[in-house]
Image: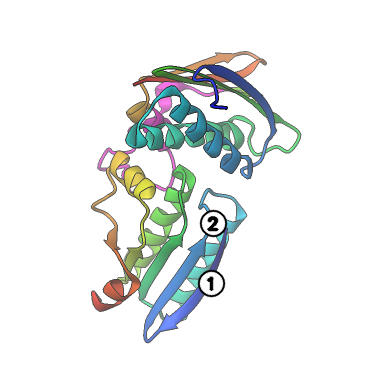
Amino acid sequence: MSEAASGVEELVLPNELDVLEQVDSLAGKYAKLAGFDDGPLIEIAIAVVEAVTNAVVHGNDMSEATQVTIRFEWSPGTFKLTVHDEGRGFDLDKVFDPTDPERCMGVSGRGIYIMREVMDSVVFEMGKGAGTTLTLEKAV
Amino acid sequence: MKFKTKMEGDVAVVHISGNLMGGAESDDVRNEIKRLLDDGSRKFVIDLKGVPWINSTGLGTLMAIYTSVQREEGALKLVHVSDRIRSLFMITKLLTIFDTHPTQQEALDSF
């Protein structure tokens, strides 16, 4: 029996980088069900991995005492991911352009840039003490 | 993620397997390159045949290795770069920074 082209899956994951392989696999699976071709599908998987990396490393500061909650939503022609961490958030105005010639050889600071390059919408919601929620969306 | 180093003449070939996504294992690869530089190696090949994908943290590891090797006037080649890793290089506009080759032999011949 084929899987539905629309659906929702929510996962609460331990705050560790090892979850990225599971997340990557699910992103590819659900983007495919939504009807994305190989090229955009790879871009979605790249963005999803960046979103969860950001939550684990920067949001939750690698703390094993925290968790990351992710929610996939897909339907024909659309893909959406929500990632929630327990961190204090950050100042979006201080995010630099990693392709700037003076920054391009740096070893960090590319995650948000990558997500913005490949997704249609990248929205951060930061509330005092409530953690950070990141929503990524892309349409075919 | 695991890695092993093999010397091919004066070229240090570092084979990586598993996704390069940051953490202590990525630090181990950086430290391995530093050790090889300290021991006098200046020619490096990183074989990514066993690496399906990397994230921006893994990309940072490659950038750190590239910078370390450049600082010592050495050369770094990447081989077996997957389509997905190449996509990440393109998105981040780093495709022209890395010298990539389809096979290990072609990389070795290019020194």
Q: Are marks 1 and 2 in contact (CB under 8 Å)?
A: no
Residue denoted by label 1: B4
Look at discs 1 and 2 and give the one toward the viewer: 2
Residue A20 image position (x, y, % from top left): 57, 40
Do discs 1 and 2 share a chain?
yes
Q: Which residues are magenta?
A: A89-115
The tag earlier along the polypeptide, 1 or 2, is 1
Q: Is residue B104 left or right of residue B32?
A: left
Q: Residue at x 36, y 61 (%)?
A: B80
Q: Secondary structure at mark 1?
A: strand
Q: Residue at x 56, y 15 (%)?
A: A126
Amino acid tagged 2: Gly
Amino acid tagged 1: Lys
Q: How many residues crowd mark 1 within 10 Å: few (<14), some (14–19), many (20+)?
A: few
Q: Quadrant of the C terminus of chain B?
A: bottom left
A39 part of magenta stretch: no
Between the residue at mark 1 and the residue at mark 2, the CA separation in whole angstroms equals 12 Å
The disc numbered 2 marks a residue on which chain? B
Q: Please, is residue A28 above or below residue B54 in the view?
A: above
The disc numbered 1 marks a residue on which chain? B
Residue denoted by label 2: B18
